[in-house]
Image (cartoon, coloured by chain):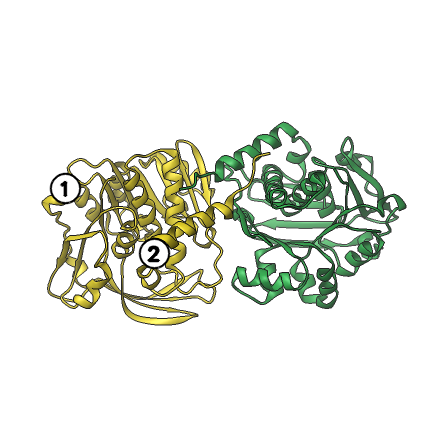
Chain colours: A green, B yellow
């Protein structure tokens, strides 16, 4: 079992969906990722919060396998985001993004983090992703996330990141934009030529499509009767996926396909309630049951 | 092995996609369905063509296990449809629909068709679907397709059909419209209460979601590098699905899940070329290979 290091945002989120509204709850990519990954292995977090992020908020991390040595606390306000979802949850509008202390964030790895073999660079400025990667002494398996904002705004730096990662986790529209290909198979091949040999394409309610050396693997999302809030589902997926890989300690076809299911299972819980609420009360037994449910959801006998 | 009866359109299609254009090629739901189903079992077709549908067109059925005793040929022009697809093939515009001889179509089953145990009512006026069902002496397993036009225009007759079918094959937007539920799990339950115990929801490039007594089964679509023309993909899926069930002769969990894969495999070929072209040159060996490819696409090991 190997530990995993992640860098990304810790935030205060305000979220409105057709099913309710919450204000100033703990969120952020690094938060969702770390809590999800900690179901499988030890997580080392690199992030920044303001002095308004106090013990009450820190409680989301307590009792979990999350090392917070690399969580900087600086004067000022924590990153804040507000989003509102459409009636079918398939699109959302960002009401505001206040970077606050994140604006001046310079990730510094504690000495104890430097030998971490598994690394996940959450969706932040590619220059910051590179700074983190430069500080890891001997990375064995590195994955990154990104978004259209960086694809359009900082393409050169993003290309440098892509050259140095083993895996990229993005959504289907980002894959099309990054590659300039409308067809997803062609898009995947084009992105693989940029660096990442393993590509994981998130398709929201339709699940995940992965491609590596062995061809494509497709996992559906779990059909759910109650979906309250999709916030953090992608980062939760990434946490479950990468956490499972780090726990396995090796990258084989069996491991990465099970990793996709582990990530999908965690994400299927994350959306059942607002913010982190469902993940925070999730038990390992429930997670195993959901993994088995994915097996039943997809199983058919060969001819 | 049991034979299957189908009723639906045989048509002249004109199709424009970003990858090309064809004019006045043979199409129609009953055509795609019958050719797909004939890979597995004997098909009995009920449909109508005009006197412009001659030997050249009839050739698409020749050498296949398709009984055309119930194909009426009447004076006038064959049903014609023209459609144009958007750049990403995800939406299409109907340029025209000329019912022609289909407008006066009254399905009459030849005596030899009446004892057919498996029945598929393709997407036509629900009153015609009922007329066909009334003529089948002892149907064992009946499935139907429908569309938003009948959901909105003839809801009472559609409800009568739903009360008498074992399975319904529709797309996700139709499922939401028919049920009035945005959530697909709730939509499925609402539709099952209308009659069909087995519901197969087509999601285009995202595959198929099925639900019956045993919970949900999800099958992805095969990721394809070249998609030329989606016309007929849904009817081809239905043909493969129902053809496989009829060939198995019994309705078990193993049979219906394999049926979904059989249908998905056939549909994945149908879209590779324009109109019927790819299906017409498809071999049973290619079909078996594609079925195996679906197993590789979806397989993961239990924890």
Residue for point 75% across, 35% down: A60
Residue A216 at x, y = what percent?
Answer: 54, 52
In this image, A221 relative to B281: left or right?
Answer: right
Marked residue nearer the N-terminal end (2 or 1)? 1
**Residue A213 falls in image quadrant:** bottom right
Q: Which mark is residue A245?
A: none
Q: For numbered disc 2, what is the local secondary structure? A: loop
In this image, A39 relative to B41: left or right?
Answer: right
Looking at the image, residue B178 lies above or below residue A212: above
CB within 8 Å, label 2 to label 1: no
Residue B158 at x, y = what percent?
Answer: 27, 44
Label 2 chain ID: B
Looking at the rendered image, the quarter that the N terminus of chain B falls into is top left
Residue A303 at x, y = what percent?
Answer: 40, 42
Residue for point 71% across, 65% down: A159
Q: Which residue is mark 1?
A: B114
Q: Is residue B297 visible?
A: yes
Q: Which residue is mark 2?
A: B283
Label 1 chain ID: B
């Amino acid at each position: 079992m190997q530990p995993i290091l992640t860098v990304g945002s810790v935030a205060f989120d305000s979220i409105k969906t057709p099913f309710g509204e919450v204000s100033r709850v703990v969120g952020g990519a690094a938060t969702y990722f770390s809590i999800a990954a900690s179901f499988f292995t030890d997580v080392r977090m690199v992030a920044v919060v303001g002095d308004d992020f106090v013990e009450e908020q820190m409680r989301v991390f307590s009792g979990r396998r999350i090392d917070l040595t690399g969580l900087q606390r600086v004067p000022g306000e924590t990153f804040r985001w507000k989003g509102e979802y459409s009636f079918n949850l398939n699109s959302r509008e960002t009401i505001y993004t206040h970077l606050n202390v994140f604006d001046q964030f310079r990730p510094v790895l504690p000495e104890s983090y430097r030998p971490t073999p598994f690394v996940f660079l959450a969706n932040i400025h590619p220059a910051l992703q590179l700074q983190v990667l430069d500080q890891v002494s001997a990375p064995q398996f590195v994955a990154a996330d990104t978004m259209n904002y960086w694809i359009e705004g900082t393409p050169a730096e993003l290309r440098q990141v892509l050259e140095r990662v083993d895996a990229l986790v993005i959504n289907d529209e980002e894959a099309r934009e990054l590659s300039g290909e409308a067809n997803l198979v062609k898009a995947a091949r084009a992105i693989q030529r940029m660096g990442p040999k393993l590509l994981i394409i998130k398709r929201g309610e339709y699940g995940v499509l992965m491609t590596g050396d062995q061809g494509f693997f497709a996992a559906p999302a779990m059909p759910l009767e109650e979906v309250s809030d999709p916030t953090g589902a992608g980062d939760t997926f990434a946490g479950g996926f990468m956490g499972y890989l780090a726990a396995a300690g090796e990258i084989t076809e069996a491991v990465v396909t099970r990793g996709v299911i582990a990530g999908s299972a965690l994400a299927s819980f994350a959306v059942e309630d607002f913010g982190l609420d469902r993940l925070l009360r999730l038990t390992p037994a429930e997670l195993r049951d959901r993994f088995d449910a994915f097996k039943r959801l997809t199983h058919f006998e060969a001819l």
